[in-house]
Amino acid sequence: MFEQQPETLHQKVKQLAIQALQQSNPTAWFDILYSESNGDVTQIPWAKLTSHPYLQDWLTNHNPQGEGHSALVIGCGLGDDAEALAKIGYQVTAFDISPTAVDWCQQRFPDSPVTYVVADLLALPLQWHQAFDLVVESRNIQALPLSIRSTVIESVASVVANKGSLLVITRFRDTEAEPDGPPWPLSNSELAQFEKLGLDEVSRVVFCEAEQTDIKQLRIEYKKCDR
């Protein structure tokens, strides 16, 4: 989320996020942004109409077998990551807090096997607890403030099934100091919370954007194992 974008759009996103924080509703701005876009993809800074390249790289190199396995895509946006998983056989549930985004997914992929639903990462359905063999969290945690970060990380970890995998794609910061945002990149201590919640880090890949060499992005794979 928040890839390189025109400054005016960046400022709009930042203003919406700050207003939502001031109203003690940090996730409220997502549907406002989708609604105000009026179907213009260029007004959604993270929408590329293709699966995220770091997810696609993982799928290509790991060749996971989706048949007979469930997957959850957190904050699915316009649905491209979910569709990529469905194509290799996963039974995919994908959710977003924005009803506009979910409607957009259903319009883009009317015959999709993916179950697109409106849901709140801060109040997930109880039936999703430890229910998914693969969970993809791509750039959602970084879009939410540090004041609720522990809660968000706990929520993400809670939906991973025993022996399941979690894939986290995020910006990363080297310091524990609170960054200016959004986005608010994750720190090592924040990422360490996943291990405290029963997820073992399997791999960590660092990416640097060609246009933004000072920004580190990570793809971390976790595995939930018996303790």
Image (tube, grey):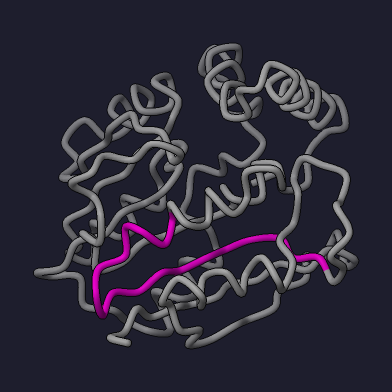
- State the residue in front, 69 or 122: 122
Q: Position of residue 19 (x, y in %)?
A: 75, 18
The part of the chain drawn in magenta is: 156-173
Residue at 68% from the left image edge and 16% from the top image edge: 23
Q: Position of residue 55 (x, y in %)?
A: 48, 66
- State the residue in front, 200 or 12: 200
Q: Quadrant of the C terminus?
A: bottom left
> Is 170 one of the magenta-colored residues?
yes
Count numbered badges in the picture: 0
In the rendered image, the residue lying farthest to the left is 68
Residue at 75% from the left image edge and 19% from the top image edge: 22
In this image, 131 relative to 4: left or right? Answer: left
- State the residue in front, 96 or 149: 149
Residue at 37% from the left image edge and 51% from the top image edge: 73
Residue at 62% from the left image edge and 81% from the top image edge: 205
Picture quadrant where residue 193 is located: bottom right
Q: Is 65 situated above or below 182?
A: below
What's the magenta bit mostly, secondary-structure-wise? strand
